[in-house]
Image (spheres, rainbow, N blue to C red):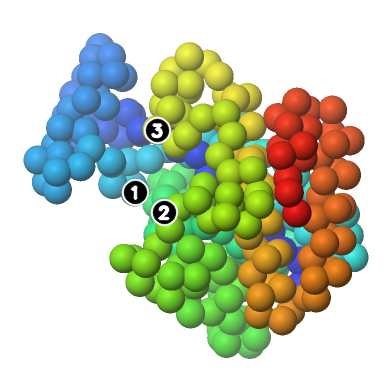
Amino acid sequence: MKVLVYDIETVPDTQSGRRLLGLGDDLPDADIVRALEQIQFQKNGRTFLPHHLHRIVSISLLLASASDEPTLWSLDGDEAEILERFFTGIDQYAPQLVSWNGAHFDLPVIHYRSLLHGIIAPRYWETGEEEREFRFNNYLNRYHWRHLDLMDVLSLYDYHAAASLDNISKLIGAPGKQGMDGGQVWEAFQAGERERISNYCETDVLNTYLVFLRFEMMRGRIGRDACDERCRRLREMLEASGKPHLEEFAALMQQ
């Protein structure tokens, strides 16, 4: 089975915010965001918006297998098109999805945004009615591994034991966060820095993949030599990319 490692980057959905708050188009986006954050803060003491009010601006993906060279790319632009292309890949390959905190953030956001745009994704939502094998291993069951949320599994499904991708990546010799962090995405989006956002998202995917390889070795699915070989392939792909953020990531890899 092919492995598809993914990560999303989001910004506040100001259009939906206007609709829910009954505010006009003349109010600046920044004011809409402040209003939404203030309401959220009054609810739970945090300004982080609920999942359905996040708009996806980038999905980065790494497709890998035991025999093929890894492939890394990003989907950006129109949100509906991003989602359609994401699910087209799932329909085509039925890969194992791998994420860090995907079950708690990325996938719920993807679900709500797909509902908003009317995205059709039958294989993703399959639970065994049409394909029997999905009854025992599908994308939706928390304890099935067709979608593997590494943060969820490594913490033994205990939120109090969860760790950040940045910390765990650095502990195993991966570079960790590069260029920015999630709290800077809205600012970068407002400044028109879409490429910078995608570059940041890609480095999160790379960190997740390196954690995944170490996890596969830990549970005996691959040997140390195979893990080292896949890391070597990844490094060579990054070095040959011609993209500064990927070349920098490769130079910082300690595996």
- Choose between 27 and 207: the one closer to the eye: 207
Neighbour tally class for label 3: few under 14, some 14-19, many 20 plus, Cα within 10 Å: few
Q: Are marks 2 and 1 in contact (CB under 8 Å)?
A: yes
**153 lies above or below 177:** below
Q: Mark 3 points at which residue?
A: 183
Quadrant of the rendered structure where residue 37 is?
Answer: top left
Q: What element carries label 2?
A: helix
Give percent across and percent down for residue 125: 53, 69
**25 lies above or below 169:** above
Q: Mark 1 points at which residue?
A: 51
From the image, state whether disc 2 or disc 1 is nearer to you. Answer: 2
**110 lies above or below 230:** above
The alpha-carbon separation of the residues under discs 3 and 1 comes to 15 Å
N-terminal of the pair, mark 2 or mark 3, is 2
Q: What residue sits 51% from the left and 30% below the top?
A: 180
Q: What residue sits 78% from the left and 59% below the top?
A: 64
The alpha-carbon separation of the residues under discs 2 and 3 comes to 15 Å
From the image, state whether disc 3 or disc 1 is nearer to you. Answer: 3
